[in-house]
Amino acid sequence: MNRMTLPGLVDTAAVLHGERAFLTVDGTRRTYAQTRTAAATMAGALAARGCRPGDRVAALLSNRIELIDLVLGCAWLGAVVAPLNTALHGRLLRHALDESEPRFLYVEGELAARVREVGYAGEVWVTGSPEAPVPGIEEALDAHPSRPGETAAILFTSGTTGPSRGVRCPHAQFAWWGRNVADSLRLTADDTLYTCLPLFHTNALNTLVQAMTVGASMAVDRRFSASRHWARAAETGATCVYVLGAVVPMLLAQPPGPADRAHRAWRGLGPGTPGPLWDAFRQRFGVTLVDGFGSTETNLVIGSAPEDCRPGYMGTVRDGFEARIVDADLSSVPDGTPGELLVRTDQEHAFATGYLGEVTPDPGAWRRTGDRVVREPDGWFRFVDRVKDSIRRRGENISSYEVETALRAHPDIAEAAAFPVPSTLAEDEVMVAVVPRAGRTLDPAHVARHCAGELPAFAVPRYVDVVAALPLTETGKVRKSMLRERGVTGGTWDRCRHDPDPGPRHE
């Protein structure tokens, strides 16, 4: 069986690691051998219900064992799984179903009403019902001879800047993710990986493959809890944790306690961690965060390692990949100059084969990422902004990331988002939404004055909204499209009206 396919990974891991503990999900524990059996019998259960190789099976399931069984069972059968964000409903759920065009839909009981409301016409399986495909009910099937370049899953982007898009992810892309990230994190068979990120996105789904690649154990929780995160890491025996940059300030905002260090974790994958928070995280929790660049469409192109990190930097280009920084005309820019990151690979089928409805890109072509980054002369890459999130005010390009970093340095701010809104003078004005720390209050004028002491004058926000929470995706990313759409309201504080002189200026 080809090791660059998901069935090949499952089968090889079962042969090599057999009775070693592999999965702990929602109270269910599986060895590697049991996981192979579950995948094969889930394939049999799917086949008994009319599913055939090439069919698409969507899932509206939270982090539960049925979702992992479905992912591996579809791969075993040669079907294509499309795990959907469990927060979707109404128009957005209809959009995802229209995009993915599944023949079958496996849905969690409490979410089934949403499917009926959008008028899905395919066959629906509800967890816990007699019709639901459950491993062990049907006979196990032999694995379908999938090829590495065939689509294994359709994963949807987060949709932070617009409608989410379905990405065709081939079998080998998962295999390369497993190899590349396991190497970056220095994972071994002695590790236990702990994630509470959703399995319908790349990060957590690829944690599954990392574990299989090295023979490690993996523990999965239903959802993220800032107050319980380190206690759960201790209970699962985690040696490696998986967080996102947006989660890091949430954990640091928790009151210090004995659970902060009462665990075995010593490193974690933390893409997008703000530089100023990196050392504070390591000092408090004893965990070194490893950054990198990867996306649903690509792989771990740029990365670092626990013994070789720089706060605020993604890392250097990994073997098998290339990266360049370009301007708006796609011409390369000098080191130290911000521009859009383009990437390509010579690892066969390591990148997605494109979006649904689009022609498969040339395997050797440069891929645009939509990220503004800087390459330093020594080869280290630093994230600046999403291209669509950059703000241009009075001829100056402003990084929303840098504005947010300045805001997070305010002692009373728990989280912040900076984004552009239209200016009456053309171009943009800078607007921010800030969330106060628990028990604190925020004066927008003080927020602006704080920024004036941290940022050049052209980057100081004009508009400030104090909000109870930021709109987030299921992976903790801020939905800036929602903030931009809402824009300036009657309750928004306007520096030009209320505080025309915010304090110190740095031109």
Image (cartoon, rainbow, N blue to C red):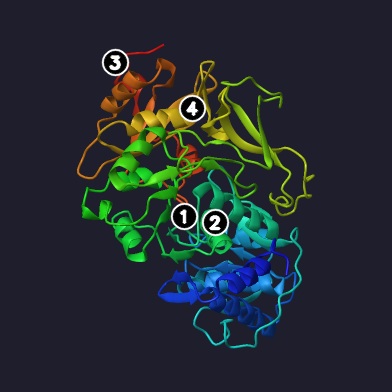
Q: CA distance from mark 3 to mark 4?
A: 21 Å
Quarter of the picture containing the C terminus is top left
Q: CA distance from mark 1 to mark 2?
A: 9 Å
Label 2 Cα crowd, 10 Å radius (few <14 / some 14-19 / many 20+): many
Residue found 59% across the figure and 80% down from its top: 37
- Residue 143 position within the rendered picture, expressed as x and y whole percent measured from the top left: 71, 75
Instruction: Look at mark 1 in the image and give the residue it sits on.
Output: 474
Instruction: Look at mark 2 in the image and give the residue it sits on.
Output: 201
Quarter of the picture containing the N terminus is bottom right
Instruction: Look at mark 4 in the image and give the residue it sits on.
Output: 399
Q: Earlier in the sequence, mark 2 or mark 4?
A: 2
Nearer the camera: disc 1 or disc 3? 1
Which quadrant would residue 436 be assigned to in this image? top left
Is residue 444 left or right of 76 when viewed as pictured?
A: left
Q: Earlier in the sequence, mark 1 or mark 2?
A: 2
Q: Amino acid at mark 1?
A: Glu
